[in-house]
Amino acid sequence: MQRIDIAVIGAGLCGLTCAHLLAAAGAEVALFEAAPRIGGRIHALRDAAGTALADLGPTWVWPPHQPAVARWLDRLDLPTFPQANDGDAVIEGYHPAPIRAPLPGQDGMARIKGGPAALVQAMAAPLPEGALHLNRRITRIELAPDGLILTDAAGTACLATRVVLSTPLRIAAHGIAIPDAPTALMQAMRATPTWMAGQAKVVMLYDRPFWREMGLSGRIASRLGPMTEVHDHSSAMGQPALFGFIGWPPEARSPAPLDTAIRAQLTRCFGPDAPAPRSLTVQDWSRDPLICTPADHDGAHPGLPPAILRQPHLDGRLHIAIAEVSPHSPGLIDGALDAGQTAAAALLSATRAK
Ligand SMILES: Cc1cc2nc3c(=O)[nH]c(=O)nc-3n(C[C@H](O)[C@H](O)[C@H](O)COP(=O)(O)OP(=O)(O)OC[C@H]3O[C@@H](n4cnc5c(N)ncnc54)[C@H](O)[C@@H]3O)c2cc1C
């Protein structure tokens, strides 16, 4: 059986942050990711050359209020730019027809140049060759006398001295057998919602930012939907774009009717002469079996994580690190960075104490 020192399960931002710090400190680390790509909830719409055009997952950071975000953007030399919000918003569902009005409330919201996907790429770049194992879904973690045995979906097993579990907690509770885990830990994992996992986001690319020419911010606030909010999502590289959050519940999101309803809402809000989007992409996270469970469909926000999720288990060999276990920013990018660096620090001090 292959023997590894530290195994990290899940190559979202949190797992990558942990692996990055462990590798930088000279630890031997293997990162197992079930999907064919890294990033987890951070995912970009790209052109044929691989350039990120728009964010299909998170978009915003608040560096003045998020110490981990501020530190990592500085360390990885990633610039930000403010969320565009000049001009009127379109507000619909409150009056017989949509109205134009200023809509404040986006102060301090920043976007990362290249999107959060640039943060993921920069975090992964220095990992040693061979450390990252894509398409490796871990299905079992079992206590052994000298470590933890990890088994993947293909039945391949390895022995790790220590393990960092960096998958959404409900996904782990449903899809990874951990026979030696305390019942209270599994209950806490099942009870913790994965932030935004039940959400769907739509990204519209345009040839020109026609809303700016109309004195509009691109923002829509709607009680009618299907998009409850829409924002200017033009990239720092100049690709005009809008994105919206879908208010329809997961079970109602059939692709064709949703596409038709989105286009009808764009016409209602921006007028019949507004250009049709060059492309319209819906990313429905509720359909991602590595991120969302049916329990996440209600969109609940994770609360302050209970202590049991922040303690090591299985003889101190299993650490849990995912955005939702950060006591500072549970569920956010800042939380993913915070939880990843906290786990790395705990592992390094445990290794030194040996
Ligand atoms: C639509 C949307 C909008 C959002 N907007 C914002 C925002 O504006 N600002 C903000 O701060 N945050 C936002 N978030 C939240 C942000 O995306 C998350 O906080 C962050 O990406 C979480 O990173 P993570 O590494 O902790 O978890 P994840 O990204 O969930 O990573 C978990 C990883 O584990 C992998 N995995 C699962 N099961 C297994 C297995 N059995 N074996 C191996 N690997 C496995 C998954 O494939 C995934 O790669 C948003 C999220 C969504 C979905």
Image (cartoon, helix red, strand yellow):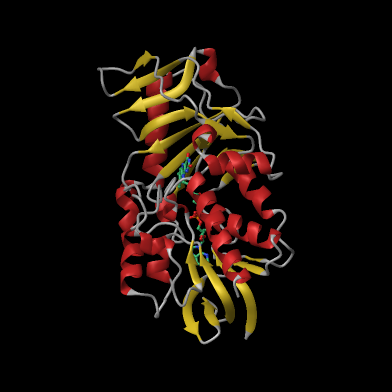
Can residue 51 be seen here? The reply is: no
Residue 218, given in percent of the width and then of the height, sits at 47, 23
What is the number of callouts on the image? 0
- In the picture, measured across the screen, residue 211 lies left or right of residue 268, that is right
As drawn, 124 above or below 228: below
In percent of the image, x 56 and y 54: which residue is there? 341
Residue nearest the viewer, comparing 226 with 179: 179
Residue nearest the viewer, comparing 239 with 134: 134
Q: Quadrant of the C terminus?
A: bottom right
* Residue 155 figure quarter: bottom right
Looking at this view, name the residue that lies furthest to the right.
129
As drawn, 97 above or below 68: above
Residue 118, given in percent of the width and then of the height, sits at 64, 43
Q: In which quarter of the image is the N terminus?
A: bottom right
Residue 174, given in percent of the width and then of the height, sits at 38, 69
In percent of the image, x 36 and y 26: which residue is there? 221
- In the picture, measured across the screen, residue 31 lies left or right of residue 142, that is right
Can residue 351 be seen here? The reply is: yes
Residue nearest the viewer, comparing 70 with 251: 70
* Residue 291 figure quarter: bottom left
Residue 337, given in percent of the width and then of the height, sits at 54, 50
In percent of the image, x 54 and y 71: which residue is there? 163
In percent of the image, x 46 and y 77: which residue is there? 315
